[in-house]
Image (cartoon, rainbow, N blue to C red):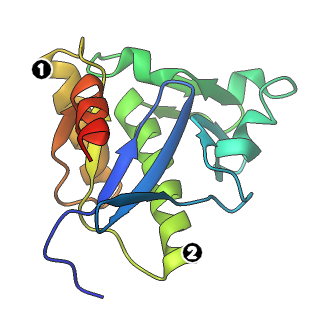
Amino acid sequence: MSRTTIDFGIDLGTTNSGIAVLKGVKPEIIKNNSDADITPSAVSYDKKGTVLTGQRAKGRVVEHAKDTFLEFKRRMGTDYVYQFQSSGLARKPEELSAEILKELKGDVQNRLGETIEAAVITVPAAFELHQCDATRKAGQLAGVRESPLLQEPVAAALACGF
């Protein structure tokens, strides 16, 4: 199905993330592969360099604390680099955010059979320009060629308007 409008919205959250599609004027949350509405914003790499995201990554945080990171959104737009000890890999916050976006895109592919090329991504109202730029870069890294950003309070107001 080829879309001419941007019907997908992503909440790329600090703790959890989610994706929805607008069907007419009604949003429909797309469940992930665990049949949940939200996906933990967690990324882990095993010693072979295989990436794990969402609940699979969050489940590794205790036993593999030096290979699993949460709340990386707080460092969006900075030069901070996360070091994954077992694999020796290093990733910036936007690269980790891209992994979460890829998982959400995969959920859409599995549930709806659609490949997402464009989606609105919400950002906190307090995000500065460099943080917004990093969020756009995360979208590009995840294969989202067009990702207009919408501040979370604006998104809430629009949702109430519908």
Query: Which is more N-terminal, label 1 or label 2?
Result: 2
Q: Is residue 75 above or below residue 69?
A: above
Of the two numbered discs 2 and 1 in the rendering, the one whose residue sits closer to the viewer: 2
Q: Badge 2, how many Cα within 10 Å: few under 14, some, many 20+?
A: few
Q: Is residue 144 above or below residue 18?
A: below
Q: Observer-nearest residue: 126 or 55?
A: 126
Q: Position of residue 3 (x, y in %)?
A: 21, 78
Kindly identify the residue that appears in the image at 46 percent across and 37 percent down: 96
Q: Position of residue 24 (x, y in %)?
A: 29, 68
Instruction: Identify the amino acid type marked 1.
Output: Leu
Q: Is residue 85 visible?
A: no
User: Which element type, helix, strand or loop, lies under badge 1?
Assistant: helix
Q: Position of residue 43 (x, y in %)?
A: 60, 38
User: Which element type, helix, strand or loop, lies under badge 2?
Assistant: helix
Between the C-alphas of marks 2 and 1, the distance is 34 Å
Q: Quadrant of the N terminus?
A: bottom left
Q: Which residue is mark 2?
A: 111
Q: Is residue 152 above or below residue 8?
A: above
Instruction: Identify the amino acid type marked 2.
Output: Arg
Q: Which residue is mark 1?
A: 129
Q: Quadrant of residue 98?
A: top left
